[in-house]
Image: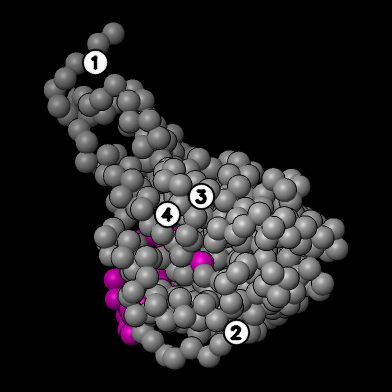
Amino acid sequence: MGAEDQVRELVASVPPASREAEEEARRRHSRLTKPPGSLGVVEELGARLSAMTGTCPPPVPRRAAVIVAAGDHGVLARGVSPWPKEVTALMVRAFCEGRAAVNAIAGAVGAEVFVLDVGVAADLPPHPRLKKARVRPGTGDLSMEPAMSREEAALALLAGARLAREVLEGLGEAGTGGERRDLLVTGDMGIGNTTPAACLVAAFTGLPAALVTGRGTGIDDATFEKKVKVVESAVRLHAPDPRDPLGVLASVGGLEHAALAGVALAGAANRTPVILDGVNSVAAALAAAALCPHCVDYLIAGHLSTEPGAAAGLKQLGLRPLLDLSMRLGEGTGGLLAIPIVRASAAVLAEMATFEEAGIGVPD
């Protein structure tokens, strides 16, 4: 079976969310010892978790993991970022050694860190946290040629899906079995990757480059203008068709975007909530949703990145971010910070008493 056929098989394995469990959760919320609607978004998220898992109350997620997909980008040669591509490999090493922001935040919220090399343009030493599935050493320059072939986009997507399944099934840091995880967070690493992210958001939303392109690592005005022109020219050159999401990924995406789309699809196929991080995670989610509309039912917007493409993408997906902390680092950091809210949303449904259980009469 070819890679594209395997992608289609993965898409077909995603079940629709349970509207029955969702409605049961809403009815239960109306009977809990609180004024109706008083927990706001927490109530809505709890109902969505019931829909995802197909049960009410939903299980409280106990073991979370962030999957950081990493890749390099040929478009960096166009001067869209002042940082050299070598930083990608250096940051992957920092993730593996536990010295990056994603590690600090993951430790604070009780999550594990897994790193996927799907396209880093450097050889990386083995590490228990690192999964090597490099499709190619970085993408082509999307301003002049397709970022990758359709086959490569499919292979990168399948690499992300494969690692997600392994993590959910209990893969340990040393590759040993263990307790399965029940909550995923998508993270990214790739110098220059907010340029293909902007291209993906423009392709899937139909918005102009100027409205979905951000400053990434904090570029100056001249570099930002250059970046917007690169996104404009790439979208014009390739004319990506959102009805062909794999083709969009191949022409203007990144290997890590394809991999994170696979993570989202594998999570959905396993009825597992997937928390999105910033603009790169959102761009990948747009591709996953275009491949499989049911996938959106399993996605949670962890936070609102300051990158404009993130807001545009979340609006397209119909997802409301849980947090707004003016973050734009990536790595999965903002998504990780939403984990306590997700856990609390499930716990409210599972652990609060109803008025009947508490012996309290409901006023007319």
Corner quadrant of residue 350? top left
Label placed on residue 305: 3
Residue on which disc 1 sits: 362
Q: Marks 1 and 2: CB-CB under 8 Å?
A: no
Rendering coords of residue 75 (x, y %): 71, 71
Alpha carbons under labels 1 and 3: distance apart: 41 Å
Q: Residue at x 74, y 45 (%)?
A: 207
Q: Is residue 16 left or right of residue 114?
A: right
Alpha carbons under labels 4 and 2: distance apart: 26 Å
Of helix, strand and loop, which one carries label 4? helix
| Residue positioned most to the top | 364
Name the amino acid, label 1: Val
Alpha carbons under labels 3 and 2: distance apart: 27 Å
Label placed on residue 334: 4
The magenta span reads: 166-188
Q: Marks 4 and 3: CB-CB under 8 Å?
A: yes
Q: Between label 1 and label 2, give the one nearer the viewer.
A: 2
Name the amino acid, label 3: Ser
